Amino acid sequence: MATDSDLEPPRKKARCSADEGPSVESKPIVVRVGETKQEFYVHESLLRANSRFFDNALKKEWKEGQEAAVDLPVHDPDLFRTWVKFLYTGRVFVGGAENLMDNERKHYPELWAWEGLYDLGVYLDDGDFRDALIDAMIDWMCASCKVPMKFARCVYPLTAESSAHRKLGVDAFVNIGRRVPVANMSSFPPDFMRDVLREIMPNLREGLDSSSAVDWFKDMDSCHYHDHGDKPCYKTKPRFRY
Ligand SMILES: [Zn+2]
């Protein structure tokens, strides 16, 4: 998983682009986040294009002289900052997550940030961001050689049965890494255990192979685990470069 650098989606390193690029003509909207009401100023066009939550929230008419503002009082400013950076860059920055962790989570702060970010992506209804987080999770699995058990526990309650994000949880659980006894199977969502069984049953006679995360994902287009369907992938959309 990326620290402050590296979840840049693959794309050509062109110095200029034929794409129009993100709109910057719209006015900035102030978003006040958390108990401290930390303020973020974000272009309205980006908020509305990427988030159905903001698209709905910004439909109201603002009175002359009134500041256009949206409050997110129960959300974490650090997580929201990561989302705003994604809007402008198309990259997921989780550096600084150590500010968010408690003692139990100190070994894998990126994972804690991932859960919170995914939850935020659901709340804001930003499918591109959630797909980018799936790519971030794949990167983390490849770099750490681990499959986080919490992935399925996080994603299943927040997704529909048809979600490709669920498929990543099942594939990783069944196919990647050493198989060790899972202490508390009842802590997994029942839908997840059903999908795991569905995946392994046809192969019980021949047995199941195990792969490293790097080998499993190396020839696979990560869109296999994205939820955009026939719509353009976030990886193909123009963002600001720096
Ligand atoms: Zn995709």
Image (tube, rainbow, N blue to C red):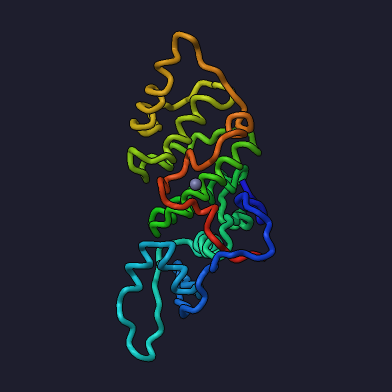
- Picture layout, residue 90 above or below residue 72: above
Q: Position of residue 238 (x, y in %)?
A: 55, 62
- Picture layout, residue 100 above or below residue 209: below
Q: Residue furthest top?
A: 205
Residue in the foreground of this view, choosing between 31 and 226: 226
Image position of 40 (left or right of 66): right
Which quadrant is home to the C terminus?
A: bottom right
Q: Position of residue 195 (x, y in %)?
A: 38, 28
Quarter location, residue 35: bottom left
Q: Quick check: can you spot residue 116?
A: no
Which quadrant is home to the N terminus?
A: top right
Residue in the foreground of this view, choosing between 152 and 10: 10
Q: Residue furthest left?
A: 60
Q: Quick check: can you spot residue 195?
A: yes
Image position of 46 (left or right of 212): left
Q: Position of residue 71 (x, y in %)?
A: 39, 71
Q: Residue furthest bottom?
A: 65
